[in-house]
Image (spheres, grey):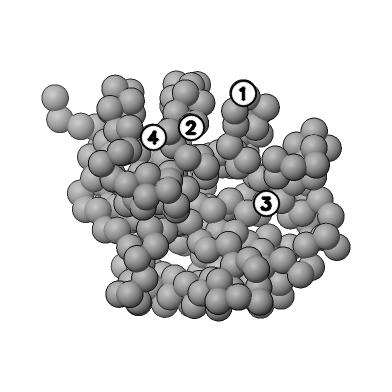
């Protein structure tokens, strides 16, 4: 089963690219972030025409996450628990039945946190704390859990072209990286780093300063796996070529292949 994550930076502006990539890659489940539209405005028909079931947790002009699945959702849960006053659309979770039991998948758009001298950085850290608290509960279910998305975290120096340029950025501050490591320490596996230690593997290139052409990238889109999912990990691919397409997102898809057979829909 192929499970992918992609911050599309506006689903309407990237629709042609998303559809083209779906036809090329044929993932089973896709976690989308930064869709930048309300639920009713999400172009579900374009994805349903390709055989996907659609779940959306949107927000007008900002944020927003979605899930596409070739197989029906048994359960869909929007919003991250822990703060009822938080209305930002950044978390969407679904349960999918497979021949080996249920699989739980979440699309995550973690706060950026910049500028760090505003309330945006404390919000980021609090959001990460809420995520860790909730994931700790989910891990008790002992089922395949896939937490995929734009974490807005550069985990290590090997995940950024020029670490010195990011030392004061919310994505790379020690406290940010410590919170991310604490999340992993709950028992999760960084899917990419489970397959390679190679530096220079990026998922984001800024639109400015020719970052793409110079390969000045960062790795901030991650797929974290519970032990039950990590045991079935086959491989990870960063679809870097998509960044060279016309009108691209500044992020590219990350695709994880798991040895999980999904139950075929009834005909």
Mark pair 3, 4: CA separation: 23 Å
Mark pair 2, 3: CA separation: 23 Å
Q: Earlier in the sequence, mark 2 or mark 4?
A: 2
Q: Earlier in the sequence, mark 1 or mark 2?
A: 2
Residue 170 picture location, percent across and down: 66, 68
Compare residues 3 and 57 and report the one nearer the observer. 57
| Other-residue count near label 1 (Cα within 10 Å), few / some / many at <14 / 14–19 / ≥20 | few
| Residue 235 in sight in this render | no
**Callout 4: SS:** loop
- Name the disc covering residue 246, or none: 1
Residue 143 picture location, percent across and down: 34, 60
Q: Earlier in the sequence, mark 2 or mark 3?
A: 2
From the image, state whether disc 4 or disc 1 is nearer to you. 1
Identify the image quadrant of residue 251: top right
Q: Residue at x 28, y 27 (%)?
A: 45
Question: Label 2: which residue?
Answer: 13
Farthest left residue?
267
Mark pair 4, 1: CA separation: 25 Å
Question: Label 4: which residue?
Answer: 28
| Other-residue count near label 2 (Cα within 10 Å), few / some / many at <14 / 14–19 / ≥20 | some
- Looking at the rendered image, the quarter that the N terminus falls into is top left
Q: Earlier in the sequence, mark 3 or mark 4?
A: 4
Q: Residue at x 83, y 37 (%)?
A: 214
Q: Report the side of 125 relative to 54 (left or right).
A: right
Q: Earlier in the sequence, mark 4 or mark 1?
A: 4
Mark pair 1, 2: CA separation: 11 Å
Compare residues 205 and 237 and report the one nearer the observer. 205
| Residue 166 in sight in this render | yes
Question: Label 3: which residue?
Answer: 219
Residue 166 picture location, percent across and down: 78, 62
């Amino acid at each position: 089963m192929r499970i992918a994550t992609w911050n599309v930076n506006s689903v309407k502006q990237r629709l042609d690219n998303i559809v083209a990539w779906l036809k090329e890659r044929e993932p089973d489940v896709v976690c989308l972030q930064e869709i930048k539209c309300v639920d009713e405005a999400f172009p579900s028909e374009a994805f349903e025409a390709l055989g996907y079931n659609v779940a959306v947790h949107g927000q007008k002009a900002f944020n927003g996450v979605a899930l596409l699945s070739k197989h029906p959702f048994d359960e869909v849960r929007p919003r991250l628990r822990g703060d009822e006053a938080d209305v930002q659309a950044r978390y969407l979770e679904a349960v999918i039945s497979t021949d080996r039991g249920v699989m739980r998948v979440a699309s995550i758009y973690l706060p950026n946190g910049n500028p760090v001298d505003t309330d945006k950085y404390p919000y980021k850290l609090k959001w990460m704390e809420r995520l860790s608290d909730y994931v700790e509960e989910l891990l008790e279910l002992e089922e395949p859990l896939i937490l995929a998305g734009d974490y807005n975290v550069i985990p290590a120096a090997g995940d950024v072209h020029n670490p010195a340029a990011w030392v004061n950025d919310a994505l790379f501050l020690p406290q940010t990286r410590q919170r991310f490591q604490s999340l992993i320490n709950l028992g999760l596996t960084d899917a990419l780093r489970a397959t390679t230690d190679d530096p220079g593997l990026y998922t984001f290139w800024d639109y400015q300063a020719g970052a793409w052409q110079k390969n000045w990238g960062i790795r901030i889109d991650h797929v974290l796996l519970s032990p039950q999912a990590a045991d079935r990990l086959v491989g990870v691919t960063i679809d870097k070529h998509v960044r060279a397409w016309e009108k691209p997102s500044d992020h590219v898809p990350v695709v994880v292949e798991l040895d999980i057979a999904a139950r075929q829909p009834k005909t």
